[in-house]
């Protein structure tokens, strides 16, 4: 898309437009910061600095407060994330059924550590504490899909499904 | 009309139940049976390990691990001809006997399902199905025939205690909020379910969301609140979706909103999605999180009943607590109080996980023994191994040994044993679980989740974790045990909130019941369960190895050498101790050595 200022038409960024929609939905609502951040992250995939700044402006609060909330919760991310987010359960039920080996297999295969993203921005690897599917332990989620009864072999096959 | 109930809970969906549903509908269309047979997507049966689960009514036929390819048989045999497809029936562990009827399966037969009654039996996205099983009758009774005080009395009479952790009497809590002055009050449902290994709240929300809403409405009426929040964990997208649908339907039909059931009572309900912080399950942290802040706890008093969200009186209860309320109002407090023990009334849902045969949700009357839960309902330990311990109550709870298997399960006896009811997660451990490693696992969890506001928890959990890590690495000293005990007591007594106050429980209980394991790690550099990597060496039994090369081919670290048909050996310097070779070996020739045994490898 043309980014220069030669055209008379202002360039409309569809993401910014969506964010504006979020602002108007929550305008005047008490305790809106967290849902606004969640919606913004849904739009951008993560929370870039400029977005945090506009949220602070819009909700009339200091940027430091926004930043404080973002860094408190595990769900918010300040760096770009992969198209597929793999969340490997390290909860109790999964732990006693060998979840750490699943994590190791993924780290080895993707050559990244817990919390990192592959350089091609395809996969992000994270650990979580319980996905609520303990009956199928060990368990992982790729985006919104839950996979259970994992073994090292199964995990590697599952990865191939996501191209 | 025949109904086919297909579970659409998180567990069964992960095992492929959506595909089964789609295929079944297709097949019924093709055979022209779509008019006579109703396909219903239900919530969780609590037996996720056996998923996808399909039930055919009438007849109560229970099929498990159903895959797409099984659908034609179900249609042709069961639905068209009333025959049972034997291969899809559940087989009792041990006897191997196939069971046809749902209620005859041991796992269910010993349960008493009040809260989970509808889960798996109604379509959670259809309000009419809830209404057909006396849904919203409790609310009706409260609003049209009882005063607010009478509702509180009824709940007090029932003896219901909070299912979210501490077990505070629910009626008394409501009374506090009722007595707090103010014209604006809130009701909050704690659906943060942070305890790893517990998933009953998720199941209730996915399987019977209206029951939770009804419980909240009754509470709202009783304490005089007109607004409520449900705080749901970010990791539960399906539960959130079901709640959204339920709230919209209830609002549509006049069970939520203005002038509910024509009685002048108003109540609106909002969902707040959590953002991934365990400490937000703590009530004061949860309330600040709803307000849009960093979810850190604060000192109580003032309790939420006096100063809650935006300083207004707020009553906060757990999902399961609220889900108990409608049945209490329908059947009466004294009926409810007839179930359970002297001081713990009603039922409790436990999440059975770990090395147990039947993993799943079991709702049992309070006072049942741990042995009945684990061996009768849970079917005992997997792979014929020996029971070692059960961890109850999550990171705040403790590990109980086999000597305590006959302990009646209720709030007070568990607390006395050093554990706690917590959310009701039961993680069963066998001889291959290292208790020091378990303690380290929980400390690692609480240390990461500590919000850092108070020093005892922030620093104490870190130091305790360091000591435990040292012990699991074989670098511990005997004085470490005393140090741990002292530190644990200090943190327990001085931390600001429940997270820190209970974080030492896993250490204190493992020290109390499994001290010998700590000592083995320290004195003999031995991990009796052969779990702690630094203390074990993989070794191939030269006489048993037949040189099949399976292990060598599967070793990612190329640590295994040996010619075909000759005994192989492992180079300890290269071995990453991942355990794949043991899985691959058919001879049982690969073993883990620990302690003195490791000297074998040296020469
Ligand atoms: C660290 C911590 C985590 C907690 N997590 C939860 C939780 O996930 N769900 C819950 O219902 N209660 C949780 N609680 C207990 C709540 O603080 C509170 O006691 C409970 O929601 C009250 O509801 P109840 O009386 O119905 O049990 C937690 C407490 C602490 C200290
Ligand atoms: S512990 Fe892994 S899903 Fe619950």
Image (cartoon, rainbow, N blue to C red):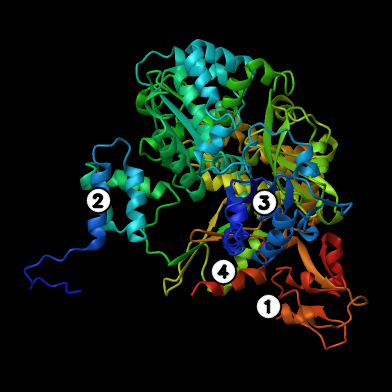
Report how far apart the C-alphas of labels 1 and 4 lie in the structure. Answer: 14 Å
Q: Are marks 4 and 2 on the same chain?
A: yes
Using the image, determine if residue B575 lies above or below residue A96. below
Q: Earlier in the sequence, mark 4 or mark 2?
A: 2
Residue name at image x 71 percent, y 44 percent: B58
> Of helix, strand and loop, which one carries label 4?
helix
| Residue identified by numbered label 3 | B48
| Residue identified by numbered label 2 | A21
Residue name at image x 58 percent, y 20 percent: B329
| Residue identified by numbered label 1 | B557
Taking depth in this image into account, of A100 and B94 the one nearest to the observer is: B94
On screen, residue B224 versus residue B591, left or right, reads: left
In this rendering, the label closer to the viewer, 1 or 4: 4
Asked whether the residues under the numbered discs 1 and 2 touch, taking CB atoms below 8 Å apart as contact, a structural biologist would say no
Q: Are marks 1 and 4 on the same chain?
A: no
Q: Which quadrant does the C terminus of chain B fall into?
A: bottom right
């Amino acid at each position: 898309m043309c980014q220069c200022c030669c055209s008379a038409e202002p360039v409309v960024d569809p993401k910014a437009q969506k964010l504006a929609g979020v602002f108007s939905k929550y305008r005047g609502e008490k305790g809106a910061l967290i849902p606004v951040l969640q919606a913004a992250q849904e739009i951008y995939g993560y929370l870039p600095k400029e977005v945090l700044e506009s949220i602070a402006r819009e909700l009339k609060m200091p940027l430091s407060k926004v930043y404080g909330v973002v860094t408190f919760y595990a769900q918010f991310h300040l760096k770009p994330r992969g198209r597929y987010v793999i969340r490997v359960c390290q909860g109790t039920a999964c732990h006693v059924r060998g979840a750490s080996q699943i994590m190791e297999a993924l780290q080895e295969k993707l050559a990244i550590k817990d919390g990192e993203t592959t350089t091609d921005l395809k996969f992000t690897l994270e650990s979580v504490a319980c996905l609520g599917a303990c009956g199928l332990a060990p368990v992982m989620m790729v985006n919104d899909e839950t996979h259970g009864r994992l073994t090292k072999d199964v995990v590697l096959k599952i990865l191939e499904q996501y191209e | 009309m025949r109904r086919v109930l297909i579970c659409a809970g998180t567990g069964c969906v992960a095992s492929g139940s959506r595909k089964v549903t789609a295929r079944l509908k297709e097949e019924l269309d093709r055979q022209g049976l779509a008019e006579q047979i109703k396909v219903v997507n239900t919530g969780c049966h609590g037996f996720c390990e056996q998923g996808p689960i399909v039930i055919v009514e009438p007849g109560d036929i229970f099929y498990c691990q159903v895959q797409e390819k099984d659908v034609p048989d179900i249609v042709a045999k069961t639905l068209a001809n009333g025959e049972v497809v034997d291969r899809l029936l559940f087989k009792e562990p041990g006897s191997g006997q196939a069971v046809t009827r749902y209620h005859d399966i041991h796992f269910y037969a010993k349960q008493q399902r009040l809260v989970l009654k509808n889960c798996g039996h109604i379509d959670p996205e259809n309000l009419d199905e809830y209404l057909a099983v006396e849904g919203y009758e409790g609310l009706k009774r409260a609003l049209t025939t009882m005063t607010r005080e009478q509702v509180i009395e009824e709940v007090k009479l029932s003896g219901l205690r909070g299912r979210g952790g501490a077990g505070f009497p629910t009626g008394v809590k409501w009374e506090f909020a009722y007595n707090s002055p103010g014209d604006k009050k809130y009701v909050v449902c704690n659906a943060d379910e942070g305890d790893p290994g517990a998933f009953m709240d998720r199941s209730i929300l996915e399987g019977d969301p209206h029951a939770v809403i009804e419980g909240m409405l009754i509470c709202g009426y009783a304490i005089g609140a007109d607004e409520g929040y449900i705080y749901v964990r970010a990791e539960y997208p399906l539960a959130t979706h079901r709640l959204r649908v339920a709230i919209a339907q209830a609002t549509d039909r006049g069970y939520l909103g203005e002038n509910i059931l024509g009685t002048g009572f108003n109540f609106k309900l909002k969902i707040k999605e959590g953002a991934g912080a365990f400490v937000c399950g703590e009530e004061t942290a949860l309330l600040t999180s709803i307000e849009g802040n960093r979810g850190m706890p604060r000192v109580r008093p003032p309790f939420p009943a006096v100063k809650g969200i935006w300083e207004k009186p707020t009553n906060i209860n757990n999902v399961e607590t609220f889900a108990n309320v409608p049945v209490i109002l329908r059947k009466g407090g004294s009926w409810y109080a007839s179930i359970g023990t002297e001081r713990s009334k009603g039922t409790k849902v436990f999440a059975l996980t770990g090395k147990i045969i039947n993993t799943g949700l079991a709702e049992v009357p309070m006072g049942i023994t741990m042995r009945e839960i684990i061996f009768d309902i849970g079917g005992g330990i997997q792979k014929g191994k020996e029971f070692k311990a059960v961890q109850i109550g999550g990171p705040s709870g403790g590990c109980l040994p086999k000597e305590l298997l006959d302990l009646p399960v209720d709030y007070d006896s568990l607390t006395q044993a050093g554990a706690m009811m917590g959310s009701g997660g039961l993680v069963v451990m066998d001889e291959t679980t290292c208790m020091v490693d378990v303690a380290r696992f929980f400390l690692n969890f609480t240390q990461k989740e500590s919000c850092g506001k108070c020093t005892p928890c922030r620093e104490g959990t870190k130091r305790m974790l360091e000591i435990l890590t040292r012990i699991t690495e074989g670098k511990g000293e005997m004085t470490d045990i005393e140090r741990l005990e002292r530190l644990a007591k200090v943190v327990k007594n001085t931390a600001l909130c429940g997270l820190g106050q209970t974080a030492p429980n896993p250490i204190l209980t493992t020290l109390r019941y499994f001290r010998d394991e700590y000592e083995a790690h320290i004195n003999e550099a031995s991990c009796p369960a052969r779990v702690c990597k630094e203390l074990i060496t993989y070794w191939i039994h030269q006489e048993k190895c037949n040189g099949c090369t399976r292990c060598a081919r599967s070793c990612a670290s190329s640590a295994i050498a040996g010619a075909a048909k000759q005994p192989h050996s492992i180079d300890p310097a290269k071995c990453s101790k991942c355990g794949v070779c043991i899985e691959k070996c058919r001879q049982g020739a690969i073993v883990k050595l620990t302690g003195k045994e490791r000297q074998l490898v040296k020469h």
